[in-house]
Image (cartoon, rainbow, N blue to C red):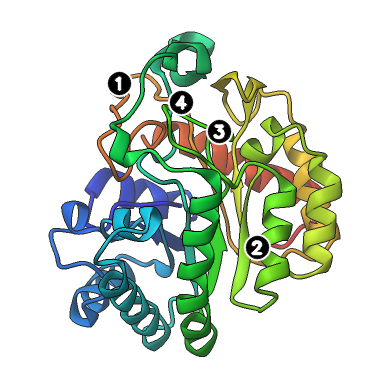
Amino acid sequence: MLLPPKFDERKWTLARQIGVNYAITKAAPDLSGRPAPYDFASLQAIKEDFNEAGFNLYGLEGDQFDMSAIKLGLPGRDALIEKYQAMLRNMGRLEIPLLCYNFMAVIGWFRTRVDIVERGGAIVSEFDVADTEGQLVSEEQQISEAKLWENLFYFLNAVLPVAEEAGVKMALHPDDPPVSPLKGVSRILTSAAAFDKVWAKFPVKSNSITFCQATFKIMDEDLKAISQNWLQQDRIAFLHLRDVAGDKYKFRETFHDNGPTPMAEMLKHYGDYGFAGPLRPDHAPAMYGENQNLFAGGMSVGYEITGKILAVGCIKGAADAYGIPME
């Protein structure tokens, strides 16, 4: 489960009570209250906190510090890339083997509403591209797809060898939503073909994929076909399980048990083709007594705990029914 890097009594306790043994976190300073994880002592302290609470810290997720210069190709990016390399080395020393990262410039994962009513009054988020019309970011933040590809390859050329040496898998997350441009900002990781393009350039073990099931679904990709191919190539290092109703231009989040994707069937599919890595429930509705947060960085919309309890139960039930071993 993705948990805050600073002890959260309710979330951490409930996660342990439902049998979650492995944690993923975003160790950014605004969430951890510590220096960014390119500082070894900071990352070591976060790992020790999780260990003391009964978790194995398996990986980091998201931007652990401001990546704008790297993604936009601005002055100062080489200094930031050096810090990224230091973070990877720290992860290797601390035996944290997974880094889920993205290359969404300026705008991260994005929704236009966070107040959509789901089953029984639960609250979920929605994206409607029509609601973004005329909302352009400043001209200096706008970037072309060609330039973004150039910046991604520059970054990966510098960091993948370090990840390889450190024993860390860098699992690239697709753009969410997978539309380009978004508010004048190009997005490039919007199809399965884009991930194959990255692999063709860097066919190394450290270059892997976060298979965010719902995001690939709204790309209108064949989930079973692309995941089978990538699993057979040992390229999927991390599974994000959630569901959405709609298409990439307009969709809303659902519960894990009432969306259009056959969740249990997909879990069996991943197991049949040899996936043996970490998986986590992704966004879940805010349920009774919970407040749906706004987008403020870190663990925002979709990261309250009660919906995750249901999600973990659904995943465990499906795994048990199909005889899929799960820690």
Number of marks in picture? 4
Q: Residue sitting at 54 percent across and 66 percent down? A: 153
Q: Amino acid at mark 3?
A: Ser
User: Quick check: marks 2 and 3 in contact, CB under 8 Å?
Assistant: no
Q: Amino acid at mark 2?
A: Val
Label of residue 180 in the image = 3
User: Which residue in the structure is indicated by mark 2?
Assistant: 198
Real-space Cα distance between discs 4 and 3?
26 Å
Query: Which element is circle 3 on?
Result: loop
Real-space Cα distance between discs 1 and 4?
12 Å
With 24 as the anchor, is 217 left or right in this view? right
Q: Nearer the viewer, residue 15 or 44?
A: 44
Q: Amino acid at mark 4?
A: Pro
Q: Quadrant of residue 25?
A: bottom left
User: Which residue in the structure is indicated by mark 4?
Assistant: 285
* Residue 235, visible in the rendered structure: no
Position of residue 197 measured from the top left corner of the image (x, y, whole percent): 70, 59
Query: Which element is circle 2 on?
Result: helix
- The first of marks 4 and 3 along the sequence is 3
- The first of marks 2 and 4 along the sequence is 2
* Residue 120, visible in the rendered structure: yes
Against 281, residue 199 (above or below) is below
- The first of marks 2 and 3 along the sequence is 3
Q: Residue sitting at 68 percent across and 56 percent down? A: 195
User: Which residue in the structure is indicated by mark 1?
Assistant: 289
Image depth: mark 4 or mark 3 in front: 3
Label of residue 29 in the image = none
